[in-house]
Image (cartoon, grey):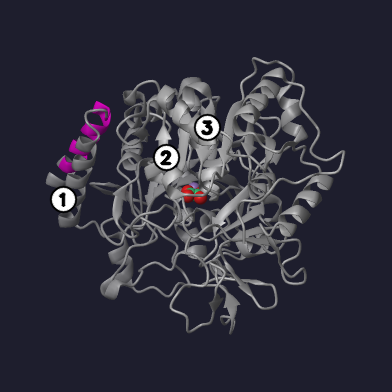
Amino acid sequence: MKNIAPAISPPSGIGDNKPANQAVLDWVHEVELLTKPENVFWCDGSDREHQYLLQEAVRQNVLIKLNDQKVPRSYLHRSNPNDVARVEQFTFICTPTKEEAGPTNNWSEPAETYSKLHGLLKGAMRGRTLFVVPYIMGPPDSPLTKVGFEITDSIYVVLSMRIMTRMGAIAVKRLGHDPAAEWNRGVHSLLDVDPARRFICHFPQDNTIISVGSGYGGNVLLSKKCLALRIGSYLARKQGWMAEHMLILGIESPEGKKHYVAAAFPSACGKTNFAMLIPPKHFAGWKVTTVGDDIAWMQIRDGRLFAVNPENGYFGVVPGTNYKSNPNAMKSIAHDSLYTNVALTDDGDVWWEGKDGPPPKHAIDWRGNDWTPDSKEKAAHPNSRFTAPVRNNPVLDPDFEKGDGVPISAIIFGGRRSNTMPLVFQSFDWEHGVYLGATMASETTAAATGAVGQVRRDPMAMLPFCGYNIGDYFRHWLAIGKRLTNTPLIFNVNWFRKGEGGKFLWPGFGDNMRVLKWIIDRCEGSNGALKSPVGWLPGLHDLDLAELDLDHKSVDELLEIDHEDWKKELAEHKKFFDSLGGVVPDELMKQREEVAARFAK
Ligand code: OXD
Ligand code: MN
């Protein structure tokens, strides 16, 4: 299967809908002169265009059409095996000074980087089509909504952007004619998909992204990690709002009382599962609805935080998704979806490790090779992905499109930790909560290239996504707290604590509702909590564990604060803060001392 495909020749009426904004026309012309494509295709997002592009992608062997009886109107794409995850080591923030990018980002000098990238892009689209993809991030009537244009030479990117964003005429209309209007310029070229020529570069001061040498979603759907998080966080700080790596969910009681919470977990730690949670039987009448599964843009109104999901689709990890772990995700990817790097069965269906039912006797694996259950290799890549429209989600929140956003009652941080971190605890206040976020850590996953399973600090799950100096990012969080009068409560959760024999102690998935219920109780003013040195913990009877097969010992272990473990943990916090070279605000340094002092009491 191919990533790189030759130029297409659309019939008249398709691909020729040029926008009127002169700044866009000039920019596209400039990139055209540089990259020398065969032709330019102006996307308008229409159904006719969509059908044409799908047909061309299949003809060019970029997509395989799946069995319409099994997964209607859905397709499989295989990426180059050298190109299956985000590449943090080749991701750069190109601010005028290194200090602006800060200690957690790779920095590269803007003029030199532009020049290097222009060198790589010179003639790079020869014989290919240059697609121009206009899109908006955010609901059409939101004050937070941003316009972006992505130039790409990948038809797979165009088809993915059509799912992940509100794409086409809607963006052209929102931008209007003013050549000075704010919009993001994104240039993507596959080049020759060579890891040695793979760079994902952000120029926040120019609202510009250039991504070359990759076809993997997180590197090339420029709307997502690049605009909505890296450039987004930079703009958010300047403009006084927040761009966060957070899911947003609604939770409604049987009496109809509704809260919204936002939760930051690192990549591939279950944000999508949590955002689509189905409460266990014991919680009959409770409803969880999804606003977003990956990104939250939040602003302050009347002293309160309101969040929108800027995206229009889900780009989630496939392996492990099944009717037990996430029935709503299964329904969301049952039709009108793109699959990347999963296995193809002999009857044209898709398969992955952890799918319901027995494995197929034979399949074609994600690399395009024969596969049987006896094969040593995995059938689907551990970071294989689905791309599905939000509207497929049976529990999409009715206020998903609300431009003002939904009011946030609680913020949850969490990571994958085998030990130390209890199932749930609550910060004493906003500043302490910012400290919890700033010192968050998680065992690494396959979402980024590199070793899997190593504990790394990932502040607010934004380590790979904060587009500026992390010290200033912490300061921004603290400053937001000062502006809030109806302040969300802040919690930390850990679904992944292990007991004897390395077994997970907590069942997770739908049962996470039990933790969510305690969080909501706390938001409603319940005093069912015990003070500990690290924060408020639920007492044994504050968590509703009815009808759950969990013994007392496991519950104790789940909620345990082990002083020796925490001594090491606090030493790690210090090491992490020190490694940032003096950028951490004093307030957070003080918070660490206060936790240590509470332990010493
Ligand atoms: C993602 C990621 O794809 O965080 O959402 O890597
Ligand atoms: Mn993510």
Mark 2 within 8 Å of ligand 1, using the beta carbon: no
Residue in the foreground of this view, choosing between 487 and 231: 231
Query: Which corner quadrant holds the N terminus?
Result: bottom right
Disc with the residue nearer the chain's start (3 vs 2): 2
Residue 291 can be seen in this image: yes
Residue 359 against residue 387 in the figure, above or below: below
Tell me residue 454's x, y (percent): 29, 57
Residue in the foreground of this view, choosing between 340 and 171: 340
The amino acid pointed to by label 1 is Lys
Label 3, residues with CA under 10 Å away: few <14, some 14-19, many ≥20: many
Instruction: Check if mark 2's residue and mark 1's residue have beta carbons within 8 Å.
Output: no
Determine which quarter of the picture holds residue 465.
top left
Residue to which mark 2 is pinned: 91
Disc with the residue nearer the chain's start (3 vs 1): 3
Q: Residue at left 47%, top 46%?
A: 263
Query: Which corner quadrant holds the C terminus?
Result: top left
Residue to which mark 1 is pinned: 567
Q: Tell me the magenta residue range.
A: 584-596
